[in-house]
Image (spheres, coloured by chain):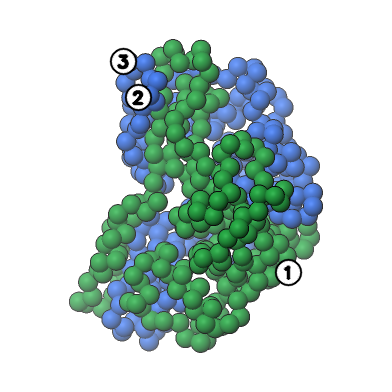
Chain colours: A blue, B green
Amino acid sequence: MSPRPDRPRHRVSRVPDRARYDAETVHAVLDAATVCHVGVVDDRDFPVVIPVLHARVGDTLYLHGSSASRLFRTAGRTEVCVTATLVDGLVFARAVFHNSVNYRSAVLFGHPEPVTEEEVKREALRAFTDKLMPGRWDDSREPTGQELKATAVLRMVIDEASAKVRTGGPVDEPEDYELPHWAGTVPLRTVAGEAIPDERLTGGIAEPDYVAELRGERS
Amino acid sequence: MSPRPDRPRHRVSRVPDRARYDAETVHAVLDAATVCHVGVVDDRDFPVVIPVLHARVGDTLYLHGSSASRLFRTAGRTEVCVTATLVDGLVFARAVFHNSVNYRSAVLFGHPEPVTEEEVKREALRAFTDKLMPGRWDDSREPTGQELKATAVLRMVIDEASAKVRTGGPVDEPEDYELPHWAGTVPLRTVAGEAIPDERLTGGIAEPDYVAELRGERS
């Protein structure tokens, strides 16, 4: 990946000291986010934003969907903006005005194209599975040719991208530090709960280790 | 709110049996989501999607930002699409093709307008605070007139809106139920961790109850 800080479109204009243009940061945000939000300009010139499952393989971003969806009908012909956001914490300042959230976000621009090659589609499906459900691919029925046809995958190169990151505690006005209000940060994270077995599960099939392991921290 | 299922723009076209047009569902998704993603069409006709803090008061959605941001410079003059998404669980099917996620999303279209009245802006800031940090407004310094001027708030009426909801377990092909793979659902939720006090916190200020209470479940 070569993010292009010279192209103004993805330059961060607001609070530029939170901006990052390195591939490592952009990739880490994409990898940690369960879904991204994809924006397109509709035929009638209004914006449409849809949540989409995604996975990254090197410098390529795959977007998962259905060939029947508005996004996938539109996306092959137009530009998209893909945004992934993680909210990492609540920041309590002494003044309401300085309350904030800690977050990581990535914003990408590009021209996605439909994946038509069966083998690439299979690789993308494997990437979606490995990201959401590590260990699952080898413990499930792989897609048939017909199922691959029914799955729509878009791919785009990650080259016009920026990230924005806020970390740390509150920043108050100098005169407010003496106020009698608590201040600090409350971290937020996503966790997995106890698995709920399918009611049609055949007797004797135990919960696999890779499902139990999801109950570790997720992001 | 009167969602308008007659207007085609926000009709759900893909998997329409997951669609909801009632205010209760749309409001609940907006209220549960920490951030939303706002899409606009840029001057140069490409889509831009930005994460934004939001709060709902009745049928009004407030969007929080800075008057310096690209979104807020553009939004007063154009239409936006606001999308909020919660990922509630991972759905493990016996076949890769039927893996899924449980989620709730809301998609709104509208023309936001900048809030200029000081009192409405204060009401919006209170709504942002009550949503993210319940109990905090009365235990912090309220905004000054100058701070209210520096805060940009957009408002839009929630009237063109839809939600999409998936719940429940996996749905496999009839012949796959005999396969020896575990199947079920793993719920995901966002939780708050131990608070990190600001290093400049004056001695003797204890963590308030409303901060400790965040460690209950969040969504």
Rendered image quadrant of residue A71: top right
Q: Residue B153 vs residue B212: left or right?
A: right
- Determine the residue positioned at 44% across, 30% down: B169
Q: Secondary structure at mark 2?
A: loop
Q: Is residue A85 above or below residue A207?
A: below
Q: Are marks 3 and 2 on the same chain?
A: yes
State which mark lies toward you, 3 or 2.
Answer: 3
Q: Position of residue A143 (x, y in %)?
A: 57, 20
The label shown at residue A208 is: 2
Q: Is residue A80 above or below residue B102?
A: below
- Determine the residue positioned at 53% across, 78% down: B121
Rendered image quadrant of residue A133: top left
Disc 2 to disc 1, C-alpha distance: 53 Å
Residue type of the residue flagged with mark 2: Pro
- Determine the residue positioned at 71% across, 54% down: A47
Mark 1 lies on residue: B77
